Image: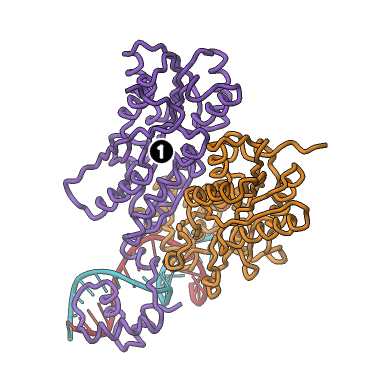
Chain colours: A purple, B orange, C red, D cyan
Amino acid sequence: MVTIRDVAREAGVSVATVSRVLNKSGYVQEDTKKLVLEVIQKLNYKPNEVARSLYKRESKLIGLLLPDITNPFFPELARGVEDAVQNEGYRLIVGNSDEDMEKEFRYIETFLQNHVMGIIASTIHSDRFLNLKIPVVLLDRTTDQFPSVYSNHQQGGRLAARTLLERGSREITVLRGPQHIRPAQERFLAALDVLSQSSACFYVMDTSFTFNGAKASVKEVFQKYPKTDGILACNDVVATAVLHEALRIGKRIPEDLQIIGYDDVPISELVFPPLTTIHQPAYKMGEEAAKLLLAILRKEKCMDTQIKLPVKLIERETTRKVES
Amino acid sequence: MVTIRDVAREAGVSVATVSRVLNKSGYVQEDTKKLVLEVIQKLNYKPNEVARSLYKRESKLIGLLLPDITNPFFPELARGVEDAVQNEGYRLIVGNSDEDMEKEFRYIETFLQNHVMGIIASTIHSDRFLNLKIPVVLLDRTTDQFPSVYSNHQQGGRLAARTLLERGSREITVLRGPQHIRPAQERFLAALDVLSQSSACFYVMDTSFTFNGAKASVKEVFQKYPKTDGILACNDVVATAVLHEALRIGKRIPEDLQIIGYDDVPISELVFPPLTTIHQPAYKMGEEAAKLLLAILRKEKCMDTQIKLPVKLIERETTRKVES
DNA sequence: TTGAAAGCGCTACCAT
DNA sequence: ATGGTAGCGCTTTCAA
């Protein structure tokens, strides 16, 4: 391993000087600088980030805490974060928590032990982060106590409900997601609000966020509410499960049954018929969260620390064309 | 920040003693040990991994280099790796390379600068790693020059071809994946081998691994080879694109056209009709790669450094039932 | 403009 | 069994 001393010796200067050119700090004569730079090249010297981090108590590391990268909503988020921080030379330490507080806790602990400069987290236990000395940005699963990036779930919930209504569904079943996940609840409530002000009748049924979890509840829907002609799902995976079962029992989509999903994860375009859904700008959300954290790290003032991104309707083929 | 000195002072012992109990190394009397442990608890002391890493030139970090987490094959892989290393207290620094050598290079450089203990990589440029002083395990995209974990692409390619043949396809189009990706080529070649020994006729067409990339080539397939009654796709995303287009132009699946995918990514179960495909044990592959790296780090001897996992046919509904 | 040296928090060696 | 201390590779005063 080639160290700063090797460079200093080879260049015939002191380590302090090398350090100065490395950090572009303090005075150093043009010639010396050029020489040092050459030696650095020649020796292929790379500063040891660990030593640097130890002294400065900072690093080029950011912690990213996600529920589960295996859930198709999160890869895009993660990629948005990575691409944005990578531009500024930061790297990501990642952890999947499965929403398990113990795991989250252990990850955060090790993030800290490794001198991460900040944390981006999607967690429902954000109280855990209250006492950290480093900045935290919440992503998707947020609370107002922290800088947050999320999408407009009110708008999304209303939009979904209105879409079904405007396209003629009269008996709507809404599949509520896990109650402890705030984004799911918010859009649920917003949808309910729209529905209850309409003349349509509607039912509510609980589901998980996963395909297999949804499968069971879906069968129940068609048994319990056989006349359902519109389903508002809490996310695309659940919507896909619905679609699946509906097709299996011979319903025509969208003639007999309209379905609307949420998230616009990649699969929603791939299923057949492709899913009408509410698009959350996942990549952008990740990006914005990263930018926000970076800005905080730079101590930039007067920026907005609650970033709410708009969602939009992606009209594909599980809903009918609007009568115009 | 509470340091080892604080603990030493509070416990009335030397830092050396505290270090010894921390590392369970050297002698330390039961009483002293108990006392130190208590103080550690009381002060909620966590050793600084950075300082530790600087001295020992090791860490609890592993680098994970992937092409793109947004490709649905990789989240499972990544999760397998994470779950396995996490058990032993390791954390992951991750990087998405987009197959870009420049990016890969930069990631590896920073991995090294952060004292990662090893690297798990899925890359086609593994020569890049030749001169590293830390262990490297290749995952999925492998070469025999490094410890590797991959699945049996020969078996998979043959299996896919035989499946189509046995279920009665006579004019088969095989969609070859990107030529520079070895796993794709291997299964392609194996499938070709089987096909050429059969009496069926077959065509080959190039596609990318992505949905949008595949879309175009898919249209072409049905124009150029309208009599195709079996499609062997290089992965599930491409298979899904085929399915999509086939349904759109009114083909009946699997009566008019059989389709077989590759990978068994989550979507393949979700599309309709669900996709018959070759299952790669992605999670397990990640896990095995992690275990292999861990074993190498522990300097365990005489283990197998080329781990080839079997694939299997997942028969769903884009192929006909075999005549028995 | 440059260099010497202290020190970031920890481990490991050498004393005792 | 315990403590003192050098040193991991770097940055940053402070002096020259």
Quadrant in which the C terminus of chain B appears:
top right
Name the residue at 34% across, 41% down.
A138
Check disc 1 and report its element: helix, strand or loop.
loop
Whether residue A81 is visible here, answered yes or no, is yes
- Residue B141: x, y in percent? 59, 61
- Residue C15: x, y in percent? 49, 76
Relative height, residue A177 to residue A297 (above, below): above
Locate residue A111 relative to residue B310 in the image: left or right.
Answer: left
Q: Nearer the viewer, residue A93 or B250?
A: B250
Locate residue B4 relative to residue B223 in the image: left or right.
Answer: left
Near mark 1 (Cα within 10 A), the count class, few <14, some 14-19 or many ≥20, is: many
Residue A219, by quadrant, is top right
- Residue B143: x, y in percent? 62, 67
Q: Nearer the viewer, residue A276 or A22?
A: A276
Amino acid type at mark 1: Thr
For disc 1, the marked residue is A123
